[in-house]
Image (cartoon, rainbow, N blue to C red):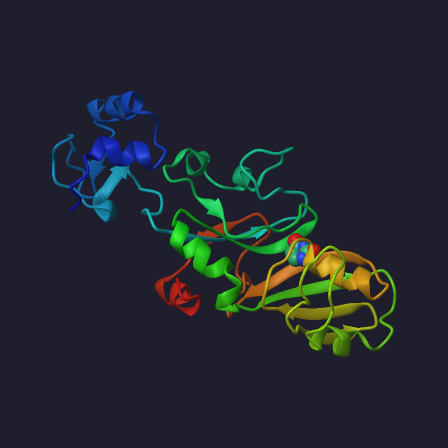
């Protein structure tokens, strides 16, 4: 049970402004799982509340995984389409908003996490966490052979960076396809790493963050993380 008024809570979850949510409650569209009508002032729990007979969106403090398709932008305001168009409209209206954890470029596909918990967001993105991110990379030219050593050296410094990159692990899958695992997330890092060794990234897909893989998610779909998945991220 929460101390917060039901109307305030639903408004914070993006179900509408205070006036719209009040109208929802007055119209008897907010119920318990057993069908009984909820009024503002009644005791309630997140898991028990239904709006139009449907369970509430994920409770505050949620972490979601989205399989981002190519073409979508990780931002609340940019040239559309935005990743928010793949989520229920309410998610952008929540207070606090459900925000991307780091960014993937518009042309990158794959695993994107989102959360409304600033501390969780910080913990996952902090370079101190050393959470590995694994990318599948398709290159426009054949590998020259020394890329794995260059990336593993911990001495590669990209133009306009002030410190060398942390060691990264390269697994060659074919002459133009690799799996690259990083423990930091610098701006356009994968694309800039391959530019630094004279190649060009043709396609980029984030396959995993830590042990988390969106293997069960079709492109464009999302789900909340399970408790054990959250724990695997330290979130
Ligand atoms: N590195 C990039 O260059 N782009 C991404 O989207 C992610 C990592």
Identified at 78% across, 63% down, the residue is 194
Give the percent coordinates (x, y) of residue 99.
Answer: 47, 45
Identified at 52% across, 61% down, the residue is 216
Location of residue 120 (image quadrant): bottom left
Give the percent coordinates (x, y) of residue 143.
Answer: 84, 71
Q: How many marks?
A: 0
Image-based side of 120 in relation to 185, left or right? left
Determine the quadrant in which ligand 1 lies: bottom right
Quadrant location of the C terminus in the rendered image? bottom left
Residue toward you, 109 or 146: 146
Give the percent coordinates (x, y) of residue 46.
Answer: 24, 45
Residue toward you, 202 or 57: 202
Location of residue 147 (image quadrant): bottom right
Note whether residue 212 is visible. no
Height in image: 22 above or below 94? above
Location of residue 218 (image quadrant): bottom right
Height in image: 35 above or below 69? above
Identified at 73% across, 65% down, the residue is 157
Image-based side of 59 in relation to 192, left or right? left
Height in image: 54 above or below 27? below
Q: Kindly give the residue lying farthest to the front in the view shown.
A: 162
Identified at 18% across, 34% down, the residue is 5
Note whether residue 69 is visible. yes
Give the percent coordinates (x, y) of residue 15.
Answer: 34, 31
């Amino acid at each position: 049970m929460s101390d917060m008024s039901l109307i305030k809570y639903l408004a914070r979850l993006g179900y509408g402004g205070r006036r719209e949510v009040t109208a929802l409650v007055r119209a008897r569209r907010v119920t318990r799982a057993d069908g009984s009508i909820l009024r503002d002032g009644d005791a309630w729990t997140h898991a028990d509340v239904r709006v139009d007979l449907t369970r509430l969106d994920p409770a505050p403090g949620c972490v979601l995984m989205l399989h981002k398709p190519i073409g979508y932008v990780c931002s609340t305001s940019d040239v559309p389409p935005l990743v928010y168009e793949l989520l229920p409209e309410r998610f952008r209206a929540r207070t606090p908003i459900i925000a991307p954890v780091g960014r993937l470029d518009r042309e990158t596909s794959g695993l994107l996490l989102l959360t409304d918990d600033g501390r969780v967001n910080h913990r996952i993105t902090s370079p101190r966490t050393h959470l590995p991110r694994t990318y599948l990379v398709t290159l426009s030219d054949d590998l020259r052979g020394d890329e794995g050593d260059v990336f593993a050296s911990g001495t590669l410094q990209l133009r306009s960076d002030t410190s060398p990159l942390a060691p990264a692990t390269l697994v060659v899958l074919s002459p133009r396809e690799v799996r690259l695992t990083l423990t930091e997330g610098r701006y356009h890092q994968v694309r800039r790493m391959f530019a630094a060794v004279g190649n060009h990234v043709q396609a980029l897909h984030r396959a995993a963050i830590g042990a988390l893989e969106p293997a069960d998610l079709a492109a464009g779909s999302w789900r909340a993380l399970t408790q054990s998945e959250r724990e695997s991220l330290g979130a």
